[in-house]
């Protein structure tokens, strides 16, 4: 079992052996949750990159999604029959 001490500013250092075992490195974002029994649970957060699209790229997406005239006719025909 590893031990650590709470610092004056509320900071905790996690022992290197624990970090290595879990594959956690510097700058890892952790979720902090108190438990009902008074423990503190640390969990790696899932962080996903966000892609920001330019107006030109959004127009490309919209153009690719546009139905052809034949596709429009087929869709209209199906909804009328239903």
Image (spheres, rainbow, N blue to C red):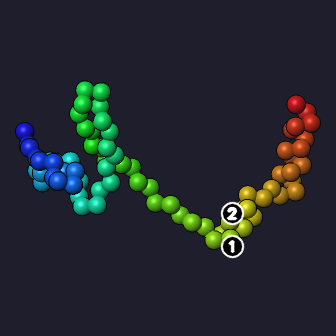
* Camera-nearest residue between 68 and 35: 35
In the shown orientation, is residue 62 left or right of residue 14?
Answer: right
Residue 13 at what x, y percent from top left?
16, 53
* Camera-nearest residue between 43 and 62: 43
Mark 1 residue element: helix
Vertically, is 38 above or below 22? above
Vertically, is 67 above or below 82? below
Q: Quadrant of residue 26?
A: bottom left
Q: Which residue is mark 1?
A: 56
Q: Residue at x 78, y 58 (%)?
A: 66
Vertically, is 6 above or below 66? above
Q: Which residue is mark 2?
A: 61
* Camera-nearest residue between 75 and 47: 47
Of marks 2 and 1, the one in the foreground: 1
Q: Residues within 10 Å of mark 2 (few under 14, many from 20)?
A: few
Going from N to C along the chain, the mark reached first, 2 or 1, is 1
Residue 78 at what x, y percent from top left?
86, 38
Residue 46 at what x, y percent from top left?
39, 49
Q: Quadrant of residue 38?
A: top left
Whether residue 57 can be seen here: yes
In the rendered image, the residue lying farthest to the top is 37
């Amino acid at each position: 079992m590893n031990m650590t001490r709470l610092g004056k500013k509320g900071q905790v250092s996690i022992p290197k052996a624990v970090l290595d075992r879990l594959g956690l490195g510097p700058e890892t974002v952790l979720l902090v949750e108190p438990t009902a029994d008074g423990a503190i649970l640390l969990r790696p957060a899932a962080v996903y990159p966000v892609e920001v699209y330019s107006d030109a790229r959004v127009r490309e997406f919209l153009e690719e999604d546009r139905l052809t005239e034949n596709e429009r006719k087929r869709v209209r025909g199906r909804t009328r029959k239903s």
